Image: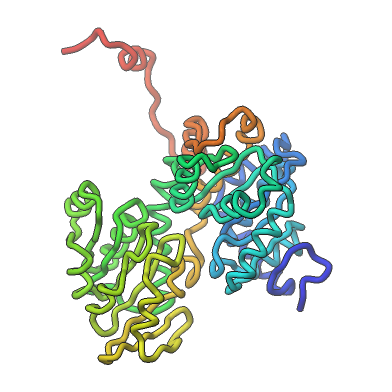
Amino acid sequence: MTTAGYRGDIRDPALAPRGRLRTEWAGTEMPVLRLIRERFERERPLSGVRISGCLHITSETANLALTLKAGGADLVLCASNPLSTQDDVAAALVVDYGIPVYAIKGEDTTTYYRHIHQALDHRPQITIDDGADLVSTAHKDRQDVLQEIIGGTEETTTGVIRLRSMARAGALRYPIIAVNEADTKYLFDNRYGTGQSTIDGITRATNILWAGRRVVVCGYGWCGRGIAMRARGMGARTIVTEVSPVRALEALMDGHDVMPLAEAAKVGDVFITATGDINVIDEQHLRVMKDGAIVANAGHFNVEINIPALERMAVNRRTIRDFVEEFTLADGRRIYLLADGRLVNLAAAEGHPAAVMDMSFANQALSIEYLVKEGRSLSPQVYRVPKAIDDEVARLKLASMGITIDTLTEEQERYLASWEEGT
């Protein structure tokens, strides 16, 4: 079946009923976004604003899209990763909700960038990005659309790194809010979301038993912290590799073994990268891994594992399970690469649980509302989410869970604001 008659490029419109049900199910776990959507429906703060979003097309993202549409936005979506699209959700967005989507799970690189260009054909006033491919494409190849853009948001660590590099080079042409740097995003989405969903993705792909295995986590940022924590919770013996002495020390005191990757490569059973850098697992590491080693990536791009080196080393390769490719080396050792080295949690599973994406996408929705109001007064830099938005998201999340907290008395506020009183 084709998508004729619909705006967008999706695999099969007939998948829409299943995608709608999945979107509704995810929505039951996203009460903060639901509260924002109800207000957006009343106030219409995004009325007529053209928005192009380059995001993982999942049931959680669908709930963000519905919130933006409720606010009056004219929205178009494309995929931010060739393997992360949930085709049934993409179909539901197009068929049932009237939101154009350009995304097909497994699309090749040419199609991926064609879809990004189609999203930019919308001539957005606001961009939403996850990895900065939309922003970088606009700046490199589609400068015709830049003049109309008020501002944008960025969802993930890798994208923020790229955007800060653009800003330092003087290349960034409009303001970006780094949603990834909101406390209610990275402390929860990156740590608890990535931790759980990465273990889930590897488990679904391989059906391995985690207990007793040596799991090597490359990088101890918030994503790496979550992965190591969840792996150890499953009974794994965890090893962390790092280049930052502070993070290495923290990993050690959190109870993980810490060593150079050259040493860990000899003893690890499962390797998970979460650094945002290139060739973290390189040829020298692949050459010493033991037979049966499993290699996976939780970072945004598929560059953290040197896949070309692995391909050169292999004398035979075959797909042995969905998302599991076996590379046999000249000496008979086998190395298993998961999900083509792409985000294993989204390629082989469903990504983060909706309950944690609730806060991340609440930050997105409120930051977009802020940009519509204030974006024209901001210079082309990368900004943190305003503290008032961060605090509001946390307040709403606690309220949705039925949890109340203390407040300062007037006396306590005066004391914290003064310097005169001591011992």
Q: How is the image coloured?
A: rainbow
Q: Quadrant of residue 11?
A: bottom right
- Residue drawn at (47%, 31%), measured in percent from left and top? 387
Q: Quadrant of residue 226?
A: bottom left
Residue 184 placement (x, y as % from top left)? 45, 42
Q: Quadrant of residue 61?
A: bottom right
Query: In this image, 42 relative to 247: left or right?
Result: right
Q: Nearer the viewer, residue 282 or 387?
A: 282
User: Does 277 sit above or below residue 295?
Assistant: above
Q: Nearer the viewer, residue 359 or 118?
A: 118
- Residue drawn at (41%, 58%), measured in percent from left and top? 194
User: Does 130 sit above or below residue 11?
Assistant: above
- Residue drawn at (67%, 44%), measured in percent from left and top? 146
Quadrant the N terminus occupies: bottom right
Query: In this image, 68 relative to 313: left or right?
Result: right
Residue found at the very far right of the displayed protein? 5
Q: Nearer the viewer, residue 358 or 263?
A: 263
Query: In this image, 105 relative to 271: left or right?
Result: right
User: Does 259 sit above or below residue 254?
Assistant: below
Note whether residue 153 is visible. yes
- Residue drawn at (25%, 54%), measured in percent from left and top? 243
Note whether residue 366 is visible. no
Residue 3 placement (x, y as % from top left)? 77, 71
Quadrant the C terminus occupies: top left
Residue 71 placement (x, y as % from top left)? 71, 41
Q: Nearer the viewer, residue 360 or 333?
A: 333
Residue 313 placement (x, y as % from top left)? 33, 83
